[in-house]
Image (tube, rainbow, N blue to C red):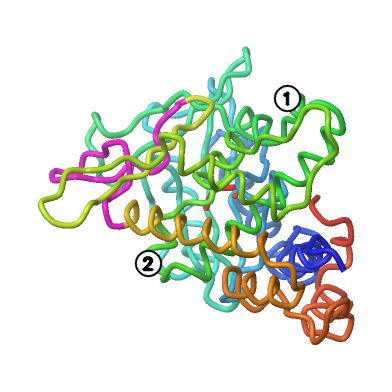
């Protein structure tokens, strides 16, 4: 069978939506906590006027975690006229609610309030925005105890970012099918990251950074039908390596690198910015994650080239299994459908709506 069939099965095995049965408990907790938050915000005379998911669920690029946990990234929006001058006040409200809801060590971070649930594998981030009469958003920025210079209502465009990721007008004919392919590529690369980086490193290789790079370097023909995912992924990875995302840093020993990737919407900041002495954030990743990313991306490109050059179906899948992990199944014989495989059973059991292959910590 063509290699695309194996990619379709892989996509089904890793694809996660908020309708997937495995996500049911996390979704119920999210809805219950949201009701609590709405009541507490009303009590503070700052009613929530809108709420929406951000990150990978908002743009349909979520994948199953290797550890079996779930991430929720939710925006809470209030009217600008009701907002307190100090943005930390409302973060404290969220923090208090999470402390009472069996969350482990909830924290106020600079852009959000974050916590892990104790009884189920649920990680949750809440970001708070104001919205003015012209439709402009501002994000609550700052930590507990931040000085006046380190907390603010910062211009942002969360829905604009979602719209940018979801946009397909530049893809030419059959744009919807090409957008589905783009999102499949994002899922593949997120699983590649999770398989090939240790836990500490993959937390710094943010999903939104991968999503932006792939979006900017995915170059389908404006006129031709979409090609198979293997060939398009190889081309996209080559484009990323040839772009300016990864830049060398001076080192007296081995070459070292940083990753630079800017948000395409306000506030246009670098998503990989890192902290230096004094706690200031500067553009670019730390050198460790940047160097790892470059080296592993070069290895990935070589592996994809080898898979393209290979004419034996089983050997192709063996190469891709090493790249993406056990969810990319190796058939027992050429032409095997793999319908009795573990991956097939998982797709049938946990992802009943994922049959159309290719329907965000970040996106």
* Residue 25 in the image: above or below residue 297: below
* SS at circle 2: helix
Q: Position of residue 292 (x, y in %)?
A: 36, 59
Looking at the picture, tell me which residue is in the foreground, 7 or 91: 7
To which quarter of the image does residue 324 belong? bottom right
Q: How far apart are marks 1 and 2 (CA)?
A: 36 Å
The segment highlighted magenta reads 267-288
Where is mark 2, residue-wise? Answer: 200
Give the class, few, some or many, for how many residues have Cα within 10 Å of label 1's Cα (few <14, many ≥20). few
Where is mark 1, residue-wise? Answer: 170
Q: Where is residue 118 in the image (x, y as percent from the top left)?
A: 52, 76
Residue appearing at x 87%, y 33% in the figure: 174
Looking at the picture, tell me which residue is in the foreground, 188 or 87: 188
Residue appearing at x 81%, y 50% in the figure: 359
* Residue 192 in the image: above or below residue 341: above
Q: Position of residue 222 (x, y in %)?
A: 78, 27
* SS at circle 1: helix
The label number, if any, that marks residue 339 in the structure image: none
Asked if the magenta segment contains residue 145, the reply would be: no
Instruction: Specify whether 189 is left or right of 107.
Output: right
Looking at the picture, tell me which residue is in the foreground, 49 or 300: 300
Instruction: Specify whether 355 is left or right of 313.
Output: right
Asked if the magenta segment contains residue 277, the reply would be: yes
* Residue 194 in the image: above or below residue 348: above
């Amino acid at each position: 069978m063509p290699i695309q069939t194996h990619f379709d099965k892989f996509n089904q095995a890793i694809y996660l939506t908020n309708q997937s049965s495995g996500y049911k408990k996390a979704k119920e907790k999210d809805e219950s906590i949201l009701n609590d938050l709405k009541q507490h915000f009303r009590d503070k005379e700052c009613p929530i006027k809108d709420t929406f998911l951000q990150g990978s669920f908002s743009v349909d690029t979520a994948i199953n975690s290797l550890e079996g946990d779930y991430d929720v990234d939710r925006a809470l929006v209030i009217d600008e006229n009701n907002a307190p001058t100090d943005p930390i006040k409302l973060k404290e409200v969220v923090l208090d609610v999470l402390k009472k809801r069996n969350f482990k060590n909830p924290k106020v971070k600079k852009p959000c309030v974050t916590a892990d649930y104790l009884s189920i594998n649920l990680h949750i981030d809440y970001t708070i925005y104001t919205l003015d009469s012209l439709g402009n958003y501002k994000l609550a920025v700052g930590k507990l105890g931040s000085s006046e210079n380190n907390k603010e209502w910062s211009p942002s465009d969360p829905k604009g970012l979602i719209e940018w990721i979801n946009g397909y007008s530049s893809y030419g004919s059959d744009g919807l099918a090409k957008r589905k392919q783009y999102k499949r590529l994002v899922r593949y690369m997120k699983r590649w990251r999770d398989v090939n980086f240790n836990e500490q490193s993959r937390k710094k290789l943010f999903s939104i950074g991968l999503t932006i790079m792939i979006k900017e370097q995915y170059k389908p023909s404006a006129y031709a039908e979409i090609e198979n995912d293997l060939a398009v992924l190889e081309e996209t990875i080559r484009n990323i390596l040839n772009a300016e995302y990864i830049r060398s840093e001076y080192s007296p020993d081995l070459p070292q690198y940083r990753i630079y990737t800017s948000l395409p919407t306000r506030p246009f900041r670098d998503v990989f910015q890192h902290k230096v002495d004094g706690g200031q954030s500067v553009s670019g990743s730390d050198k460790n994650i940047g160097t790892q990313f470059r080296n592993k991306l070069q290895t990935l490109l070589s592996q994809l080239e080898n898979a393209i050059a290979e004419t034996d179906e089983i050997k192709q899948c063996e190469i891709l299994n090493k790249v993406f992990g056990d969810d990319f199944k190796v058939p027992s014989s050429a032409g095997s459908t793999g319908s009795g495989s573990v991956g097939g059973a998982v797709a049938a059991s946990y992802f009943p709506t994922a049959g159309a292959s290719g329907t965000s910590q970040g996106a």
